[in-house]
Image (cartoon, rainbow, N blue to C red):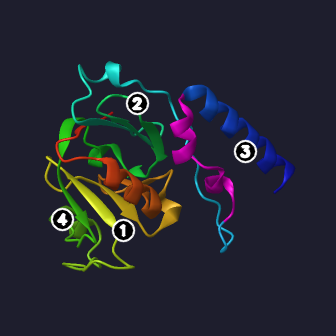
Amino acid sequence: MTASNSRRAFLMTGMAAGLAAPSLLRAQTLEALEPTPEGVRRNASSFSAQTWQDHFDTLGVATIVADTSSRALHYWNADGSDYRIYPTSVPMSEELTKRGYTKIVRKKVGPTWTPTANMRARDPSLPAFMPAGEGNPLGTHAMYLAWPAYLIHGTHDTRKIGRRSSSGCIGLYNEKIAELFAITPIDTQVRLI
């Protein structure tokens, strides 16, 4: 690790500790700052602090706030004792960014992918359908929102995390979406800001 990386790791650790409870540190690890075996640096987000009270009257069964500006997803369980924050990919343009209130309506391990007509118009090389597996852009787990064609999902392409790279969805590292998937019930309230 270079001196610059050491300073960045120290600053990121200090900011994370100051922003939230210890559960924050479980979700945001310093591995995101380390080069991958291929030598590609992962993207680390500059997380903005969020409180669920700024967005919802109650926590409901659970609460998610996806912050497209800081490229982070915030999760709170039903009693607020478990708060986690995850780095994300976000929509690649304002035109593709949907904001507002929705909820988790379905969850799927090993999701299949059917690109929308708009996605195929932008990129005619996209397949009409892709089965679950290594090349699938939805990764290993997907949580479907009440808005058609909008999801919170994993990605096999870790270079996308921390970037404007999706067609409207919120993407997480596969290991992080698996963790979030396990603790997030159907009917979790979601706000995209």
Q: State how far apart marks 3 and 1 are (Cα).
A: 27 Å
Residue 9 is marked as: 3
Q: State how far apart marks 4 and 2 are (Cα).
A: 38 Å
Residue 191 seen in the current view: no
Q: Residue visible at 51% across and 38% down?
A: 23
Sequence order check: which comes first, mark 4 or mark 3? 3
The C terminus lies in quadrant: top left
Q: State how far apart marks 1 and 4 are (Cα).
A: 17 Å
Could you tell me the amino acid type at mark 1? Gly
Q: Nearer the viewer, mark 3 or mark 2?
A: 2
**Depth check: 75 or 50 in front?**
75
Residue ID for mark 1: 139
Could you tell me the amino acid type at mark 3? Ala
Q: Is residue 160 above or below residue 125?
A: above
Q: Is residue 184 above or below residue 1?
A: above
Q: Nearer the viewer, mark 4 or mark 2?
A: 2
SS at mark 2? loop
Q: State how far apart marks 4 and 3 are (Cα).
A: 39 Å
Residue 125 image offset from top left, x and y in percent = 29, 79
**Depth check: 123 or 172 in front?**
172
Task: Give the left or right position of residue 14, taking residue 120 as reference.
Answer: right
Q: Which residues are magenta?
A: 20-35
Q: State how far apart marks 3 and 2 are (Cα).
A: 27 Å
Could you tell me the amino acid type at mark 2? Ser
Q: Nearer the viewer, mark 1 or mark 4?
A: 1
Query: Could you tell me if the residues under marks 3 and 2 are in contact, i.e. CB atoms within 8 Å?
Result: no
Residue ID for mark 4: 116
Could you tell me the amino acid type at mark 4? Thr
